[in-house]
Image (cartoon, rainbow, N blue to C red):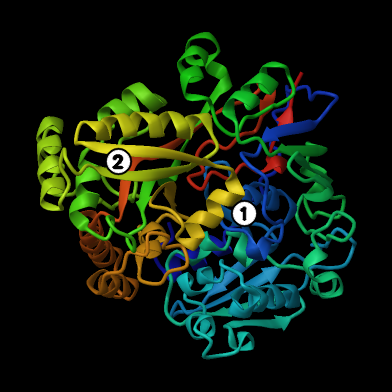
């Protein structure tokens, strides 16, 4: 993580090689370079301005579009559409120099005005876009006021200084800004194409892209297919000719097709298959530690989950040792906090029950439920919602069984992806499978989502003291002071228990042994098809 404007400036002035498919000289490439990957679900949109991180469209948009910067095999920020950038002494102005050879897939140049248009469109609340909060997170000048409807999108702190120079003005220094610039919300879009076709601009016959690939076909509920974009600035180093993304929510269906040779990389590994593959074909298992946590989210606006005693009882009723060792069993660290252990220099605070043994936690949970009015004669009963997946179902069944030990009855509700996302967004759930995921390596990337009225705050948790600490942290002069305030805020979150942290992500996949070029350590989980290649 870049800790100061000076550090950013130094890094930006160094000669940093662009990393595409880095092929060893002794390697013989396969004749067919068609990459088929499991995508987890059907994408809702392929519009980069409207794609939330972690959603099915995220993977595809990363291959079709590109912003100022991208990430290398170790997750470090490197030049993308920008060749260099400079930061002012006060850390509030960033100037990006665009590649003069960067073009859209229709051959037109990518210009500074494409970024200005995309950002003003993305931050505009009247579009119904729910990713505009990223501009506030990045502290782009006037973003907060625009999101609140107090200023026009044209007042956003972005300016086309020249056709190939973009100036970004911040409301205050933001040490994690460069890491945010690889998030889809900050990508450019082709203004003339968007204005000509409106909501239909992302259809295969209309879309224009500036990344390594362009859309060839989208068959709803089946697959999305892209092919190489010959206009991409680094096309000469791209090897994969075609990528097919399969919208399979079932890990079993993925496994069957993987074993049949129809998929080169799955989205997940079915839990009960992990140990078998580790014994029989360990080289086919690839794992990535991610900046995020697998959680259950409470709807705190509805009884009985407006009662903190009930929420605490349920989080204490989960035996995380059994969960990660016997149920998931793929090397996931158990979680008692939303923020994982992958952020250097930050130690997440633990909840008050952390030092208790599991039997002691069970006893405390029963007492809390009794105080809340629930006992053997009046048991707590509710519905736990999860999206279609054998893995999510297995975890839900295990946790429901654990909760029986504290006298709780759970009804399981499985939903297809789009219905599940809509239910959480509308607050139409009681307890739901969810995630806390960060887009940049700092605690705020996860903790911001629990501030009052945040668009990603699905639990509707709201605490003024928490928000005050988060605001102070954003203005703290040093990383040490900032992290101390984040820790205080997360301690409040832990005691309020609007979520149940279960484990920190260790994303495992099955990967064909002939597929090479996978990232070594990318905490965002990004895997760019342009960096991959097949060998004989």
Viewer-closest of 14 and 530? 530
Viewer-closest of 498 and 182? 498
Viewer-closest of 228 and 223? 223
- Looking at the rendered structure, the secondary structure element under dot 1 is strand
Which residue is drawn at the image coordinates 38% and 30% (left, top)? 397
Q: Position of residue 529 (x, y in %)?
A: 70, 41
In the image, residue 321 sits, relative to residue 95, either above or below, namely above
Is residue 100 something one can see in this rendering?
Answer: no
Is residue 500 something one can see in this rendering?
Answer: yes
The residue singled out by tag 2 in the image is: 335
The local crowd at label 2, few if under 14, some if 14 to 19, many if 20 or more residues have their Cα within 10 Å, is many
Which residue is drawn at the image coordinates 90% and 62% (left, top)? 107
The residue singled out by tag 1 in the image is: 70
- Sequence-first tag of 1 and 2: 1
Viewer-closest of 3 and 332? 332
Labelled pair 1, 2 in contact (Cβ < 8 Å): no
Residue 168 shown left or right of residue 229 in the figure: left
Tell me how far mark 1 sits from mark 2, CA to CA.
30 Å
Which residue is drawn at the image coordinates 87% and 73% (left, top)? 196
Query: Farthest residue toward the top?
Result: 280
Q: Quadrant of the N terminus?
A: bottom left
- Looking at the rendered structure, the secondary structure element under dot 2 is loop
The local crowd at label 1, few if under 14, some if 14 to 19, many if 20 or more residues have their Cα within 10 Å, is many
């Amino acid at each position: 993580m870049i800790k100061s404007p000076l550090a950013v400036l130094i890094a930006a002035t160094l000669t940093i090689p662009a990393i595409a498919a880095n092929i060893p000289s002794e390697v013989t490439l396969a004749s067919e370079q068609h990459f088929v990957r499991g995508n987890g679900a059907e994408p809702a949109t392929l519009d980069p301005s409207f794609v939330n991180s972690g959603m099915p469209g995220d993977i595809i948009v990363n291959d079709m579009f590109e912003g100022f910067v991208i990430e290398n095999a170790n997750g470090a920020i490197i030049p993308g559409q920008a060749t260099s950038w400079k930061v002012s002494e006060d850390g509030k102005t960033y100037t990006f120099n665009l590649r003069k050879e960067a073009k859209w897939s229709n051959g037109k140049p990518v210009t500074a005005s494409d970024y200005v248009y995309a950002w003003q469109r993305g931050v505009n609340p009247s579009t119904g876009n729910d990713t505009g909060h990223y501009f506030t997170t990045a502290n782009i000048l006037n973003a907060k006021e625009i999101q609140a409807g107090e200023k026009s999108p044209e007042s956003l702190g972005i300016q086309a200084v020249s056709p190939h120079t973009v100036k970004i003005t911040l409301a205050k220094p933001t040490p994690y800004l460069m890491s945010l610039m690889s998030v889809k919300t900050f990508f450019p879009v082709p203004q003339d194409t968007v204005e000509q076709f409106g909501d239909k601009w992302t259809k295969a016959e209309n879309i224009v892209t500036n990344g390594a690939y362009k859309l060839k076909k989208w068959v709803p509920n089946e697959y999305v297919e892209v092919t190489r974009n010959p206009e991409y600035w680094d096309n000469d180093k791209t090897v994969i000719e075609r990528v097919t993304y399969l919208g399979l929510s079932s890990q079993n269906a993925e496994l069957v097709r993987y074993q049949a040779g129809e998929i080169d990389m799955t989205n997940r590994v079915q839990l009960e298959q992990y140990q078998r593959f580790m014994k029989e074909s360990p080289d086919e298992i690839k794992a990535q530690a991610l900046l995020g946590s697998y959680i259950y989210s409470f709807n705190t606006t509805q009884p009985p989950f407006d009662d903190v005693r009930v929420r605490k009882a349920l989080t204490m009723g989960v035996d995380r040792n059994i969960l990660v060792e016997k149920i998931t069993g793929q090397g996931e660290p158990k979680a008692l906090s939303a923020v994982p252990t992958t952020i250097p220099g930050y130690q997440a605070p633990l909840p008050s029950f952390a030092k208790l043994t599991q039997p002691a936690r069970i006893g405390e949970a029963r007492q809390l439920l009794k105080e809340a009015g629930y006992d053997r004669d009046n048991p707590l009963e509710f519905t736990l919602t999860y999206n279609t997946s054998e893995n999510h179902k297995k975890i839900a069944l295990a946790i429901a069984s654990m909760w029986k030990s504290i006298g709780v009855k759970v009804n399981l509700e499985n939903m297809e992806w789009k219905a599940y996302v809509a239910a959480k967004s509308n607050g139409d759930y009681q307890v739901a499978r969810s995630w806390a995921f960060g887009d940049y390596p700092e605690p705020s990337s996860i903790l911001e989502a629990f501030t009052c009225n945040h668009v990603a705050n699905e639990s509707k948790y709201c605490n003024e003291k928490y928000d005050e600490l988060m605001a102070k942290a954003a203005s703290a002069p040093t990383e040490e002071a900032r992290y101390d305030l984040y820790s205080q805020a997360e301690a409040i979150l832990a005691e309020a228990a609007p979520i149940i942290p279960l484990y920190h992500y260790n994303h495992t996949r099955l990967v064909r042994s002939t597929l090479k070029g996978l990232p070594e350590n990318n905490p965002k989980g990004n895997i760019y098809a342009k960096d991959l290649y097949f060998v004989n």
